[in-house]
Image (cartoon, helix red, strand yellow):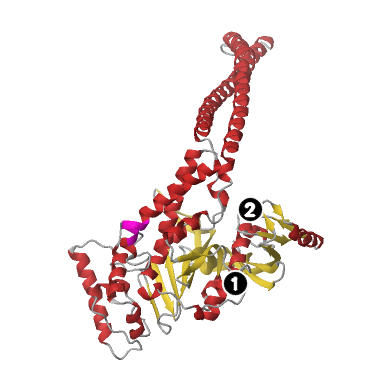
Amino acid sequence: MSTFAAPLEAYQTRLKREHFLLVRQTLEELIQRSGVDVAANQKTIQQLNETLQMRDREQWWLRVWKVVCTCLGALTIGGLIAAGLGLLAFVTATHLPYRLPLLIIGGVVALVAWHLKFFWFNELREAAAQRVRGIETEVARLEALAWKQMEPLNALFTWDTVTDLLRQVLPDVHFDRMLSQERIDDLEVGLGWRDEATREISIRQLQSGAIQGNPFVIAEGLSSRMGEKIYSGTKTVLVRRTVYEGRRQTVRLVPEVLRATVTKPFPVYFPVAFVLFGSDAAPNLVFSREPSKHSGQEDTFFNRLAKRRTTKELEAFSRNLDDEYGFTMMPNREFETLFHAKDRSDEREFRLLFTPYAQQEMVKLLNDTTIGFGDNFRMMKERCITAVFPDHLLKTEMALSPGHFRNKDIVALKQHFVQYNVDYFKAFYFALAPLMTIPLYCQRRTPTQMLTRRAATETSAYENELIANAYGDAFFKPAKCVTPCLLKTTTRGAGDATRFDVTAYGYRAVPRTDYVRCYDSDGNGHQVPVQWNEYLPVQATTPMIALPDCVTETGATRSAADALALLRENNYSVTNVRHIRSSYVAKV
């Protein structure tokens, strides 16, 4: 029986608890393997927290003494000014009210404030500053000690830590260490995937693998489109106004502000998260669906009425034989209403996928509001490729380095490790759940259907995009580009190292001015200037080289030494990016 049979119930009754217990057990095993003294680390962290609280108190007192010293300095200056004015009045025989009190009080205030500042509060401020410096030294010592105590445990986390936990709970799922060209070949050559849609997406996070030999790719990236932006401008003109002063009537010119707007193209950037799944089940079927407004609603009179109205519309659409669709409604009206895939191209293959059991499980998934994420996904099938766009993946961190779990506090590390793995498992599972409600998608592909055309260590263009985005678009941004950049890669060849080009696509802004004719209250026309920016595309290409098997986090192996020397001779800056899955270099 497949791991994903009845996915909602399986997660709630079995998989969620199994994964949680496995995460805790794995963490305890890692702690035991590392030999970390938990009690000693907790004692260090307790001392560190107490020291930090002491530092905060001393810093508060230091700020108080600084404010007091500043006020006393101001009083000293003010008293001297007052005393100086009083003395000047006596010397010049100027009649100044209260000149004697001004001289005496100003002098006394200046003297007392100066004495308090330089003989008392300055000492308090310096003493507080010295204590803060001493406490900061102690904080640095305790932090270094805590990191040293946790170093053996922090070193045990690897790129496979999270996926190893998933693999044990979901034995039908195979996880790739990286998205290789071999996996892309399986999707493109073996299953006919065309990547027109993903060409407009710059991949920032990736997870790939196979379920019973059926390949999948989970990705998050950045995309863009040309939207619109409203620009405004103003112009002040003089208009005539009649003013009545008693019986007299006067015409005056008064200012009036004219406002104008123009709407111009503007690049809009937005994140996209998706799941690609390849299966040769129902190879001719094409359909799409959007989240339904009826999913997960309470069973009230008005909700039932709205759902019944949608069902009636589908029944009428099913009886219409004059349109281009061959849509025929199935007996499960709730499934048809919620799934609402009325653009399907092949009724026979649609029923082959969505058996009565699959319909039942899909309805449960769509109506769920407590276990998973409910009906938060779009779904499209294009022959052998099915794409799912779950909204919750936009908030999920997938490209994690081993350093993600590093911490100096054993308690905080435990909490973060458990919470992250629980959240990631839920996000991953329910990203695939819409696919796994379909029994045919859980069947094993025969070995003759799978292709092996490239070396498993050869990176794909999407993996290279992940690496490029790990550097950040600022590294590749074209000159004069004022917008974010979409990074796309093109492989140039393969050998000991994979050479590829990173092209950054962005926009430069060119100032423009439009003149819009507006009319004032007198009916006179005026040209109001509106300044706007015209966004013109720009791009820049930077060569990179991937060394997935040569350079490691601990340094270059002997087999890589010659390659690295050659790269440096050719003006490449060798950079070991520790927070990504392989080592890459970029040309300056």
First in residue order: circle 2 vs circle 1: 1
Q: Residue furthest right?
A: 569
Residue numbers of the magenta segment? 10-15
Q: Residue furthest left?
A: 301
Q: Which mark is residue 181?
A: 1
- Whether 419 is drawn above or below 203: the answer is above
Residue 231: x, y in percent?
53, 63
User: Is residue 367 rendered to the left or right of residue 239?
Assistant: left
Residue 155: x, y in percent?
59, 46
Q: CA distance from mark 2 to mark 1?
A: 22 Å
* Amino acid type, residue under disc 2 in the picture: Arg
- Whether 206 is drawn above or below 24: the answer is below
Res 87 visible:
yes
User: Is residue 331 rendered to the left or right of residue 347?
Assistant: left
- Look at 56% across and 51% down and name the residue there: 402
- Whether 195 is drawn above or below 24: the answer is below
From the image, tell me which residue sits under label 2. Answer: 578
Query: Depth check: 483 or 116 in front?
Result: 483
Asked if the stretch drawn in magenta spans residue 549, the answer is no
- Tags 2 and 1 in contact by the CB under 8 Å rule? no
